[in-house]
Structures are given as structure tokens and as C-alpha cells.
Amino acid sequence: MKTAIITGATSGFGRAIAFRLASLGYQLIITGRRLDRLNELAPQLASQYSINVFSLCFDVRDNNACTNAIQSIPYSFQKIDLLINNAGLAAGALPFDESDLTDYDQMIDTNVKGLLYMTKLIVPRMIEQQKGHIINISSIAGIEVYPNASVYCASKHAVNAITKGLRIDLVKHGIKVSSVSPGMAETEFSIVRYHGDTEKAKAVYNGLTALNADDIADTIEFIVTRPDHVSINDIQINPAQQANTYIAHRK
Ligand code: NDP
Ligand code: 8X3
């Protein structure tokens, strides 16, 4: 049985990926900061798919918390085959001169440093196994920069650079490194971005059918079910009505 660890499994992509990997027979380590959601999700996954699930409640921005969490993983989950670095966010959507330093810190600390902390902790296990797979959830914001999102875009450009660097450095250890770069997807992402303003969040998707979390789970399923000799480097996936970060055709 393969083991996967998913950061940010309490919502959106991470939650959908957890269900999909469970359906593929993975045993799961699910993580996030919201304990109530982890406590609800773990037994649901375990009973629906007859798999083992271990939850870890911590903040990926805190390296000590990441270290303690990974050290607490029970023996039967220690051989980690798949790391999904998904925890992340956009905070705020304002021009640079009007935007807030605390939002910058949150995005860089979560999307970049949190991903690095988790990867640094899991990679030695994969090197020991001479096998493993890391999938980083990036964004089309890592490919093109759009207005009012300089730091979010910077964080996802960093994710792409880290992904490429890891792929180069880890290839000799049999470790695959992939990324998924979605466009607009309706999760809790925009609610978080607009600091809880659900009206503004809803308006982001006006007139178009956004991606949903299952679309991303489909993509992850494709990546992890390729044969051993095949590595998917990146999959960019958009709503059909979104051409790129600038152009969306709203009906
Ligand atoms: P959600 O807000 O629905 O989910 C985000 C997840 O990340 C939650 O489970 C949250 O858990 C977790 N998370 C956030 N901050 C932290 C933290 N500091 N420590 C631990 N966990 C954290 O958004 P999505 O599912 O849409 O986003 C998932 C990823 O996809 C992000 O990296 C995002 O940038 C990326 N993405 C999203 C797109 C979209 O349009 N939705 C498009 C492209 C990429 P908790 O709050 O419990 O800690
Ligand atoms: C978020 C997707 O289209 O807002 O990563 O950049 S988009």
C-alpha cells in the first residue's frame, strides 16, 4: 500500500485529492490547521475507502511545528511515497502600493517557505527509498503575472523555480517532481483572498464556470497513475472560459 501526505487537506483541492488518492488505495496523512475539519475528514476517508488515515494539525509556516508533526508520524506511515504540497493561499487583491505587508508575509511564508519546510523534511525519506514523488500545487499565477497580485504571483513563480530545481537535484535518486498549475477554481480560495468577504469572492466567478476541486483531483490521478518510467513535469489547467490570467470570457 502506498502512502501519501497532503498539506492543506481541510478544504478545496487538498480535500478532493485526499478522496481521490483514498479511492486509488493510498493510505493518507492529511494535514491542515483546522482540527475540527481533520477530525471529521479522517474517519470519513477511513470508513469510505477502508484505508488508514493519520491527521496532523499544524501550520506549515512554523518549521518547528512541521518538524514535530513529521516526527510524530507512526511507523506504519513512515515510508512516504507521495508528497502533495498543496497548502497555500492568496491574501488580498490590491495594487502593490495599497497592499499589506502582513498579506505578503502570509503568502511567502505559506506558499514558499512552508513548501520548502515540508519538502526538506520528506525528501530524506524518499532518498533513503531511492523512490518518491513530489507534486507541488502551483498556479497560472506562476506563469503570468496579473494586476493586484504581484506577491501571490511571485510566490507561485518561486514554486515553479523550486519544482524545476528539485527535479534536477533529485533525479539521481529516482524521485519524480511535478507541478499542477490551475487557473480559476471555485474553492475557499477567493473567500480567503478577500479576507472572508463572500460577496467579493463569489463575484470572481461571475459569468463563467470555474474549475472545481475534482478537476484538480482528476489531474493528480493522471499524474500518479503514469508508469514508473514516465514523469509529468507540469500540467496547466484552466476553465474553458479562461484563456490566461488576463482574459476570461464571461457570459
Ligand atoms: P482553499 O482555501 O480551499 O484550501 C487551502 C488549504 O490550504 C486549506 O486546507 C488550508 O487549511 C491550507 N492552508 C492554508 N494556509 C495554511 C497554513 N499556514 N498551514 C497549513 N495549511 C494551510 O484553497 P484551494 O484548495 O483553492 O488552494 C489550494 C492550493 O491551490 C493553494 O496553494 C492555491 O494557491 C492553489 N491554487 C488555487 C487556485 C484557485 O483558483 N482556487 C488556482 C491555482 C492554484 P487550514 O485553513 O485548515 O490550515
Ligand atoms: C489562482 C488562480 O487565476 O487567480 O492561483 O491566478 S488565478
Image (cartoon, rainbow, N blue to C red):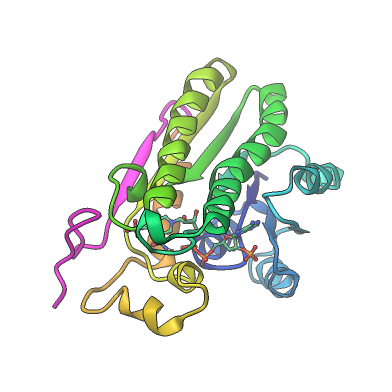
Residue 203 seen in the figure: yes
Q: Pick out the residue farthest to the top.
A: 172
Identify whether 159 is placed above or below 231: below
Residue 228, percent across and down? 48, 30
Residue 30, percent across and down? 68, 57
Identify whether 155 is placed above or below 7: above
Is 248 a magenta residue? yes
105 relative to 96 in the view: left or right: right
Q: Residue at x 43, y 51 (%)?
A: 152
Q: Residue at x 72, y 23 (%)?
A: 128
Write the start and end of the magenta stretch as one range: 228-251
Residue 56, percent across and down? 76, 57
Residue 139 seen in the figure: no
Name the dominant secondary structure of the magenta segment.
loop
Quadrant including the N terminus: top right
214 relative to 196 in the view: left or right: left
Q: Pick out the residue farthest to the bottom.
A: 199
Q: Nearer the viewer, residue 143 or 236?
A: 143
Q: Quadrant of residue 51?
A: bottom right
Is 212 a magenta residue? no
113 relative to 161 in the view: left or right: right
Q: Quadrant of ligand 2?
A: bottom left
Residue 59, percent across and down? 71, 55
Quadrant including the C terminus: bottom left
Q: Residue at x 32, y 49 (%)?
A: 140
